């Protein structure tokens, strides 16, 4: 087998990759023949993970990235720029889950979660955007969660519809899906950015430190959709939210609201406030 010259090998960065899903994504991107930067906020743990994976893929390089610290991202971008001049694949994987009973949720809990899960994704994209632009077929994958689906979270028949300790986490992941759509819209419209694809992935309930290994799927299973989105062809989607089975439903279909809920909202509003004046905006 002839190996591609080093400079032709796709270059990938995965944040939060010293353990869990991120580490498995690094392993699989490495197997695809990419040079993979294993982002970790703790350099010793990142180096240990990279060493473990080196037996399978020689081009796995630990890189210090704390997504709550813009300076580490700027330094990481500088390193990637000096070595490769571009970034082909960015997996914004770093994430935290701080459980807290819904009715005790504090702004501090929300801010700590959002700093990593939402602002961390924005900081990462902001730092890496010039390098992504310089790649020929750049792909960005954000890590959302099935708990970010308004449709599933409002269905009591699902585990998400019964959860009441993840106000911060679930809402942060809903923000991730929305920022993914907004970036995709912007990339599509801006000259010089249209070749960048960005999609949100949910790996399903995988057994990792995030959930004290209570998940029912393996990291190998969870990584599959991330790999698919990281290696999309040029006619692939952008701005979507996907799991293994395809698109994840974002919200309830309008049809389900049309009947009872809409009618009862209208009639109770009319009972409290009187009928709306003729010609006022409805619905
Ligand atoms: N597990 C699931 O069922 C599940 C489901 C849906 C989505 N996800 C998402 O998948 C992603 C990976 O989660 P996981 O299950 O693999 O959890 P995990 O094993 O806890 O891994 C999370 C990773 O993020 C890193 N991280 C946390 N804060 C960071 C920061 N400020 N800067 C850089 N890295 C940081 C952690 O580093 P340390 O080791 O230093 O803490 C760790 O490497 C997360 O975004 C998560 O929300 C997971």
Image (spheres, grey):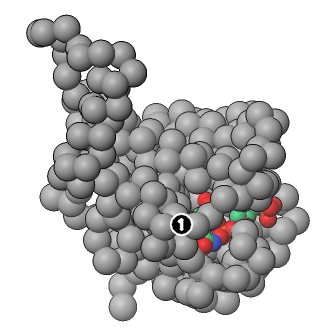
- Where residue 30 sits in the image (x, y, percent)? 52, 77
202 left or right, relative to 268:
right
Expressed as whole percent of the image width and height from the top left, the position of residue 262 reads 26, 40
Residue 27 lies in quadrant: bottom right
Q: Which residue is found at the position 45% from the left and 57% from the top?
A: 154
Q: Residue furthest right?
A: 44
Tell which quarter ligand 1 is in: bottom right
Relative depth, front residue between 169 and 89: 169
Q: Position of residue 263 (x, y in %)?
A: 23, 40
Quadrant position of residue 88 = bottom left
The answer, for residue 261, to whether it is visible in the render is yes
Nearer to me, 143 or 110: 110
Q: Is residue 48 left or right of residue 199?
A: right
Residue drawn at x 46%, y 34% is: 130
Q: Is residue 123 above or below residue 27?
A: above
Whether 110 is drawn above or below 205: the answer is above
Q: Is residue 263 left or right of residue 72?
A: left
Residue 187 seen by the camera: no
Taking the image as shown, residue 199 lies to the left or right of residue 209, namely left
Judged from this view, the residue extending furthest toward the left is 279
Residue behind mark 1 = 160
Quarter that holds the C terminus: top left
Count of numbered badges drawn on the protein: 1
Mark 1 surroundings: few (<14), some (14-19) or many (≥20) residues within 10 A: many
Observer-nearest residue: 69 or 160? 160
- Assign a secondary structure to mark 1: loop
Indicate the position of residue 260 as horizontal and vertical percent values: 25, 49
Q: Looking at the image, which residue is at 39% across and 21% down?
A: 272
Give above or below for 160 relative to 132.
Answer: below
Which of 53/118 is in front?
118
């Amino acid at each position: 087998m002839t190996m591609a010259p080093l400079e032709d090998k796709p270059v990938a960065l995965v944040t939060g990759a010293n353990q869990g899903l991120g580490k498995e994504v690094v392993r699989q991107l490495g197997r695809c023949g990419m040079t993979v930067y294993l982002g970790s906020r703790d350099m010793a743990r990142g180096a240990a993970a990279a060493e473990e994976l080196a037996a399978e893929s020689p081009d796995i390089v630990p890189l210090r990235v704390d997504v709550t610290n813009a300076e580490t991202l700027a330094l990481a971008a500088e390193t990637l720029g000096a070595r490769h001049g571009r970034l082909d694949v960015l997996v914004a994987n770093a994430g935290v889950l701080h459980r807290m009973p819904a009715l005790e949720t504090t702004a501090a809990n929300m801010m700590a979660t959002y700093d990593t899960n939402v602002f961390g994704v924005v900081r990462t994209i902001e730092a890496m955007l010039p390098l992504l632009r310089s790649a020929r077929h750049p792909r960005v994958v954000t890590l959302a969660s099935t708990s970010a689906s308004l449709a599933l979270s409002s269905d009591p028949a699902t585990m998400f519809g019964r959860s009441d300790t993840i106000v911060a986490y679930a809402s942060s992941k809903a923000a991730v899906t929305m920022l993914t759509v907004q970036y995709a819209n912007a990339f599509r419209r801006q000259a010089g950015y249209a070749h960048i694809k960005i999609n949100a992935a949910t790996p399903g309930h995988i057994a990792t430190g995030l959930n004290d290994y209570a998940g029912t799927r393996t990291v190998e299973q969870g990584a599959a959709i991330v790999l698919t989105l990281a290696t999309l062809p040029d006619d692939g989607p952008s701005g979507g939210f996907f799991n293994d089975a395809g698109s994840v439903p974002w919200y309830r279909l309008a049809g389900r609201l049309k009947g009872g809920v809409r009618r009862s909202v209208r009639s109770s509003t009319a009972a409290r406030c009187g009928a709306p004046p003729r010609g006022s905006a409805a619905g």
